[in-house]
Image (cartoon, rainbow, N blue to C red):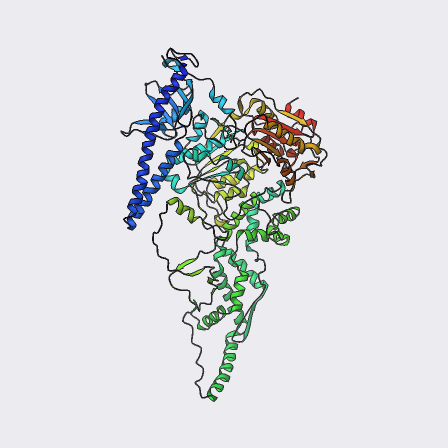
């Protein structure tokens, strides 16, 4: 028989639990002692690496590089594991005891002391249940502070086999869910639940699709899966990279500590707003503008924008050959431009050479039309005759015939070769070429669409006339902030334009008489021509991580290299627009994927289009570099999972969010919340002009009630970039709100005045409050959580877009302990409280 003995005193003093803790502490001390030895070994290896460098040969430098790099990673991993090294113990029916920890630790004789949580032998720790004990009699979770075990909690999984076994614990897991949130997500290695573990250890190939309501641990699970994949498939994912994508920078800041705390620093964590080097998003577009920018028709619009003439491009080309003026008019030039674009999709920036050739062809044809060769000969003969007469009078030799240039064109026609050579040398030609076919950067092209007439040309029939002005306005001005949707457009443009040619490393000095080298740049190819006597010599120790970092450096705001990844994790995937999926697809042509989403939280309206774009991205199918032709690889395997337990919200808060869900998406079912707090959410009805001051007062009150973070979540701000779809007034001066829909699905918020908040409203609201209070709009709140949340003007959130109710559902599901809602509309109070 086992016994549940928490606080029972023992003969030797202290409780049984104290004794158990002391026994575990002895084991944990041995593990730490061994960790210290391993650290000393790794440090000795680093010293040895540096010692080898003194030998000075290239070979030893490479060895040193590898040795120091490996040993440094090892020390780093050991340092990270130092906090709470051992967190679990399994007692098996076979009487074997396994300790589970952050990393694997072995004795110097290679006996296992601690099993890495990601190893197969640790799986039972997460998977065993009373219904399916998998040979586990007792599972014990050790709670530690630093090196000290402070608490234990046992699960008895096989009572029949537990003879004489002590079982302690009092629901510490549930209690731990109510812990104070300090603004950063923490790892959950010690308490991963079975359904979560199945996702974490899902197969590494194909696509893993995880769905779940707010708070079910989707983000936590996705991050632990990254650590798992990197541990189990280090060679594959470590070298080719793992990308984790979150919705915005606030979110990536919130989760950024989880992977390092699991000992994984190698994954790349980016938000949708900073995935493209050289263009960082700082604003969200208004829903209507976002909808247009995110739709896949933008791909065609951008293709046309790139093919349009560059701003300031000259409309006519005139060169002179042997006294004859040869000109190409706008019509001819436009046809040539279209032809070059047709042939060079995806490499527009390297097509200047082709453009020059086609211009020369056209000029030669025009020259012939003008009766060129004969006229030129007559002209040349007359000119030479005159000069020779003058020279003869001076007693000097006569002019030679113009020697044919050494190089000849493909036709082998020396006259044509001479024509082309002369034309190429003319400043009129080279200046034209540079202005007519400039090296274009994605941001320049996007900004050029701030000109409504240019945007209209690019849009063709793909945009509503009403959308042109707001779209163009969002791109007008050098300093116009970039939006999250703009970043995907920049990436699309980058794929269409291709990278400008990189500087070539040439040993010899640039030829001074090369007419195409102007100010050190070959204007035909865009190549920088540098006199470089660079020798590959290994001066400094570089690790592979540093080299990778360096290879991705940015030059002039242009992506130098757009890396692809072996695995991509997309969090909050329900919000991605088709254009954003295209952006991700380009980074994962060969990747396996983990997609984490909750369709009920989606702010994106056209879910079908987004789904299609997702399938194209996951399938590796894409219009390659803007080409229409697509490559359709074999469909990938897909594993789908559903997470069903809400670990974030108290049952009281979960009830409010379930009411919003019922309105937003009647067919969806909420997750089961497991923790009851006894604290009911509060909904105050406040006159609209007082909403801001009431929000501040609510935040101040919550500061006295919770120790951790407080989120004040307001509707989307009203700025020049954000244009609410419904008529709006400033936050402090509005009148009526939008009534909650009494029933039926979303997308039908009743018309009325929505209250949008200006950025200065937001600033005023947060001024002087401590750092643990964050004021943020509903879109920025995605994926975050707070001890307490104040939701301001739910009626406005619901009315700001056709998906407003889903956005509100996100907002009301952020708090772990306390929820306060402020509304100007009594109907909303009743709707949220279910009264
Ligand atoms: N097994 C677990 N043990 C302890 N805490 C957990 C566990 N699973 C989830 N949590 C906690 O629950 C909270 C919600 O997790 P997470 O943010 O990953 O949920 P989510 O499903 O991504 O939510 P949302 O859809 O709102 O973004 C976090 O604080 C997380 O640490």
Q: Position of residue 759 (x, y in %)?
A: 63, 40
Query: Can residue 437 be seen by looking at this rendering?
Result: yes
The picture quadrant where one finds residue 399 is bottom left
Q: Is residue 259 left or right of residue 714?
A: left
Nearest the viewer among 650 and 444 is 650
Residue at 44%, 84% in the rendered image: 398
Residue 135 visible at all: no
- Please identify the quadrant where the N terminus is shown: top left
Asked if 289 appears above or below 437 in the picture, the reply is: above
**Depicted 821 relative to depicted 721: above or below:** above
Image coordinates of residue 282 in percent, x first then y, are 57, 43
Q: Residue 636: horizontal and vertical position, in percent?
A: 44, 37
For the image shown, how many numbered marks are present on the structure?
0
Instruction: Name the side, left or right, on which 219 lies relative to 312.
Output: left
Name the residue nearer the viewer: 285 or 356: 285
With respect to residue 98, does 393 lie above or below? Answer: below
The extreme right residue here reads 735
Q: Nearer the viewer, residue 639 or 92?
A: 92
Query: Which quarter of the image is occupied by the C terminus?
Result: top right
What is the x, y in percent for residue 94?
32, 19
Res 564 → quadrant = top left
Taking the view exactly as shown, the residue that stands out farthest to the front is 13
Task: Classify 200 as above or below 152.
Answer: below
Taking depth in this image into account, of 149 and 736 the one nearest to the observer is: 149
Q: Is residue 727 left or right of residue 406?
A: right
Q: Residue at x 66, y 40 (%)?
A: 725
């Amino acid at each position: 028989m086992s016994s549940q003995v928490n606080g029972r005193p023992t003969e030797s003093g202290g409780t049984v639990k104290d004794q158990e803790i002391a026994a575990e502490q002895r084991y944990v001390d041995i593990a730490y002692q061994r960790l210290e030895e391993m650290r000393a070994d790794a440090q000795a290896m680093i010293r040895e690496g540096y010692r080898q460098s003194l030998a000075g040969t290239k070979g030893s430098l490479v060895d040193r590089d590898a040795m120091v790099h490996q040993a440094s990673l090892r020390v780093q991993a050991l340092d990270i594991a130092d906090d709470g090294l051992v967190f679990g113990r399994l007692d098996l029916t076979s009487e074997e005891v396994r300790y589970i920890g952050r990393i694997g630790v072995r004795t110097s004789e290679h006996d296992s002391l601690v099993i890495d949580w990601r190893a197969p032998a640790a799986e039972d720790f997460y998977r065993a249940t009373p219904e399916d004990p998998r040979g586990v009699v007792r599972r014990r979770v050790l709670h530690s502070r630093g090196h000290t075990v402070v608490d234990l909690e046992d699960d008895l999984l096989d009572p029949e086999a537990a003879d004489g076994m002590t079982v302690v614990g009092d629901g510490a897991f549930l209690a731990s869910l109510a812990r104070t949130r300090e603004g950063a997500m923490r790892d959950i290695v010690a308490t991963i639940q079975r359904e979560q573990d199945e996702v974490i250890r899902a197969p590494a190939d194909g696509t893993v699709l995880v769905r779940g309501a707010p708070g079910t641990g989707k983000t936590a699970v996705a991050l632990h899966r990254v650590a798992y994949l990197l541990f189990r498939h280090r060679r594959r994912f470590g070298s080719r990279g793992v990308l984790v994508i979150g919705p915005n920078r606030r979110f990536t800041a919130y989760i950024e500590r989880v992977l390092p705390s699991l000992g994984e620093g190698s994954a790349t964590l980016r938000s949708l707003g900073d995935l493209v080097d050289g263009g960082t998003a700082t604003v969200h577009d208004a829903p209507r503008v976002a909808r247009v920018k995110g739709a896949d028709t933008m791909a065609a619009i951008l293709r046309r924008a790139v093919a349009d003439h560059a701003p300031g491009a000259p409309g006519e080309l005139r060169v002179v050959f042997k006294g004859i003026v040869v000109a190409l008019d706008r019509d001819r030039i436009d046809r040539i431009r279209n032809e070059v674009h047709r042939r060079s999709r995806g490499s527009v920036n390297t097509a200047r050479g082709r453009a020059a050739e086609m211009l020369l062809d056209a000029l030669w044809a025009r020259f012939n039309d003008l009766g060129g060769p004969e006229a030129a000969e007559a002209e040349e003969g007359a000119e030479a005759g005159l000069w020779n007469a003058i020279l003869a009078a001076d007693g000097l030799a006569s002019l030679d015939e113009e020697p044919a240039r050494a190089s000849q064109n493909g036709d082998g026609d020396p006259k044509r070769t001479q024509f082309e050579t002369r034309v190429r040398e003319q400043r009129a030609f080279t200046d034209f070429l540079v202005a007519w076919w400039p090296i274009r950067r994605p941001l320049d092209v996007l900004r050029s669409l701030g000109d409504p007439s240019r945007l209209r040309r690019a849009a063709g029939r793909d945009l509503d006339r009403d959308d042109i002005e707001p779209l163009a306005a969002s791109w007008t001005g050098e300093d116009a902030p970039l939006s999250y949707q703009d970043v995907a457009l920049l990436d699309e443009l980058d794929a269409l334009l291709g990278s400008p040619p990189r500087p070539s490393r040439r040993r010899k000095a640039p030829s001074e008489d090369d007419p195409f080298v102007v100010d050190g740049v070959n204007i035909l190819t865009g190549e920088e021509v540098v006199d470089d006597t660079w020798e590959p010599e290994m001066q400094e120790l570089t690790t592979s991580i540093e080299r990778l970092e360096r290879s991705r450096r940015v030059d002039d705001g242009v992506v130098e290299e757009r890396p692809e990844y072996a695995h991509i994790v997309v969090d909050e995937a329900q919000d991605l627009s088709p254009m954003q999926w295209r952006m991700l697809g380009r980074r994962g042509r060969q990747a396996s994927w983990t997609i984490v989403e909750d369709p009920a939280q989606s702010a994106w309206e056209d879910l079908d289009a987004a789904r299609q774009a997702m399938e194209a991205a996951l399938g590796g199918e894409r219009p390659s570099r803007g080409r229409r032709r697509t490559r359709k690889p074999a469909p990938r395997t897909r594993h789908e999972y559903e997470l069903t337990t809400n670990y974030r919200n108290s049952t009281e808060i979960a009830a409010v969010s379930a009411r919003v869900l019922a309105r937003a998406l009647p067919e969806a079912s909420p997750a089961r919340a497991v923790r009851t707090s006894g604290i009911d959410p509060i909904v105050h009805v406040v006159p609209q002009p007082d909403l801001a001051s009431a929000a501040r007062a609510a935040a101040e009150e919550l500061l006295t009630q919770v120790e951790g973070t407080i989120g004040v979540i307001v509707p989307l701000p009203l700025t020049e970039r954000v244009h609410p779809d419904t008529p709006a007034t400033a936050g402090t001066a509005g009148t009526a709100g939008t009534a909650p829909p009494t029933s039926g699905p979303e997308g039908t918020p009743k018309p009325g005045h929505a209250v949008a908040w200006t950025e200065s409203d937001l600033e005023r609201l947060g001024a002087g409050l401590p750092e643990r209070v964050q004021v943020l709009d509903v879109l920025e709140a995605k994926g975050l959580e707070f001890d307490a949340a104040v939701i301001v003007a739910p009626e406005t959130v619901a009315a700001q877009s056709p998906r407003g109710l889903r956005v509100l559902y996100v907002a009301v599901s952020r708090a772990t302990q306390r929820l306060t809602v402020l509304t100007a509309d009594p109907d909303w109070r009743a709707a949220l409280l279910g009264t």
